[in-house]
Image: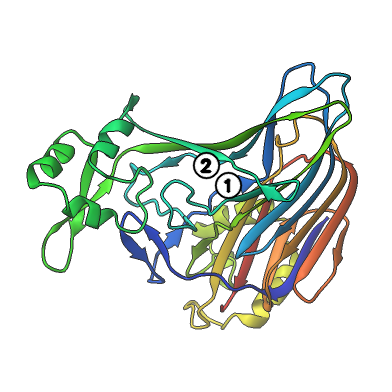
């Protein structure tokens, strides 16, 4: 069962990638990052169960609260983790929707365990052609995830060092600035992990809470507009969205009410997308008491996603509750509106 409704959400319009501000200009699109909840690594004989999960997703933030319990007869050493997505910067045309400005904690992750700071530690490494170049980048004072001031960091390098990085393929030229100076983009990929090891006594439970800034992919138009969705060359994109987001006729009816007629996007519609990774994040078994809320933030956008047994709990929010929940797929959300 899908849910399509007229609704809206506000999103920060500017994203930073490799030192350039990504703003709303024609033809631009940013790619949403697949983010989710906590992961648990445990010994094979440990009996750790999810008693509950309460997840709230909106275009500004994600908050997920969990209760886990050791049901086994012995103490269990478990590692709580948060899966940060791998980032491959080697394609200059790929623009990731990186929501934070910290090059290490680039989603603004905050954690609590039983109400106290969670103390999740971060590790990060950079790879280029199968070689670890982390030390080299740090030696040259370059952030591994190039957000915010990457061009300034490059400009601070001695010209011979910058030339060497270009010659070895660590950075590649991507046009020039207004003064004619060469601009470069990184050619490496980055892996980031975050986690905390805890011990649970037999019968002991722990409340784990995480929150972070939502990665929202955005396009300045959508192939779902009428009459674009009827064009043959856009058929594959339209079908992909229908499948990924369970789009139905009610969604199109709502979209047509807010979209201007004609080929041009004179109504200035924007398509926004979010992904929450559900599948594979509960290796300890089904979640006994599961609640998930998707809040679109404003009532003047259309929204669609694939969840069953939904209840509208506010003009902008939809709730799903389930017992012994074992997700079969990740949650993908599409929202379209003028704002």
Say how many tags the image has.
2
151 or 34, which is in the foreground?
A: 151
Q: Earlier in the sequence, mark 2 or mark 1?
A: 1
Query: Which residue occupies the extreme left position in the image?
Result: 160
Q: Is residue 148 above or below residue 186?
A: below
Question: Mark 2 near mark 1, Cβ–Cβ under 8 Å?
Answer: yes
Disc number at residue 209?
Answer: none
| Residue 26 place in picture, x, y as percent | 38, 71
* Residue at 65% over, 78% down: 256
Element at badge 1? Answer: loop
Residue drawn at 57 percent across, 51 percent down: 109
Residue 250: tell me if it is visible: no
> Disc 2 marks which residue?
85
Using residue 96 as the reference point, say whether residue 290 is left or right of it. Answer: right
Q: Quadrant of residue 37?
A: top right
Above or below, 141 against 153 in this view is above
Residue 194: x percent and y percent?
55, 38
User: Can residue 13 be spotted in the picture?
Assistant: yes
Q: Residues within 10 Å of mark 2 (few under 14, many from 20)?
A: some
Q: Which residue is mark 1?
A: 34
Could you tell me how far apart the alpha carbons at marks 2 and 1 are, in whole angstroms?
A: 7 Å
User: Mark 2: which secondary structure?
Assistant: loop
Vertical relation: 191 (above or below) 98:
above
In which quarter of the view is residue 198 placed? top right
- Point out the image quarter for the N terminus: bottom right
Quadrant placement of the C terminus: bottom right
- The answer to which of 182 and 234 lies nearer the viewer is 182
Q: Is residue 33 left or right of residue 164?
A: right
Residue 116 in picture, x, y percent from top left:
69, 49
Q: Residue furthest top?
A: 45
Residue at 55 percent of width and 70 percent of height: 11
């Amino acid at each position: 069962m899908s849910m399509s409704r007229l609704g809206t959400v506000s999103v920060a319009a500017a994203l930073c990638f490799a030192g350039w501000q990504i703003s709303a200009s024609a033809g631009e699109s940013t790619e949403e990052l697949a983010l989710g909840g906590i992961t648990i690594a445990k010994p094979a004989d440990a009996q750790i169960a999810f008693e509950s999960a309460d997840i709230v997703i909106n275009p500004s933030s994600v908050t997920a609260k969990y209760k886990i319990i050791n049901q086994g007869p012995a103490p269990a050493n478990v590692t709580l983790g948060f899966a940060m997505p791998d980032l491959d910067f080697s394609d200059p045309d790929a623009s990731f929707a990186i929501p934070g400005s910290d090059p290490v904690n680039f989603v603004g992750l905050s954690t609590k365990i039983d109400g106290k700071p969670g103390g999740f530690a971060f590790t990060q490494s950079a790879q280029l052609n199968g070689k670890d170049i982390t030390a080299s980048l740090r030696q040259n004072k370059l952030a591994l995830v190039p957000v915010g001031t990457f061009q300034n960091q490059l400009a601070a390098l001695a010209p011979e060092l910058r030339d060497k990085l270009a010659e070895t393929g660590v950075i590649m030229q991507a046009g020039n600035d207004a003064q004619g100076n060469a601009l470069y983009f990184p050619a490496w990929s980055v892996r980031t992990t975050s986690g905390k090891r805890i011990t649970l006594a037999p019968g002991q439970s722990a409340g784990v809470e995480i929150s972070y800034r939502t990665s929202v992919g955005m396009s300045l138009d959508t192939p779902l507009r009428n009459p674009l969705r009827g064009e043959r060359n856009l058929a594959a994109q339209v079908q992909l969205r229908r499948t990924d987001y369970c789009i139905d006729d009610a969604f199109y009816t709502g979209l047509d009410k807010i979209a201007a007629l004609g080929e041009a996007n004179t109504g200035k519609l924007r398509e926004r997308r979010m992904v929450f990774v559900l599948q594979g994040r509960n290796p300890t078994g089904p979640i006994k008491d599961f609640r998930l809320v998707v809040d679109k933030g404003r009532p003047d956008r259309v929204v669609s996603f694939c969840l069953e047994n939904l209840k509208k709990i506010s003009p902008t929010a939809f709730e799903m509750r389930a017992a012994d929940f074992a997700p079969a797929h990740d949650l993908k959300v599409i929202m379209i509106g003028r704002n």
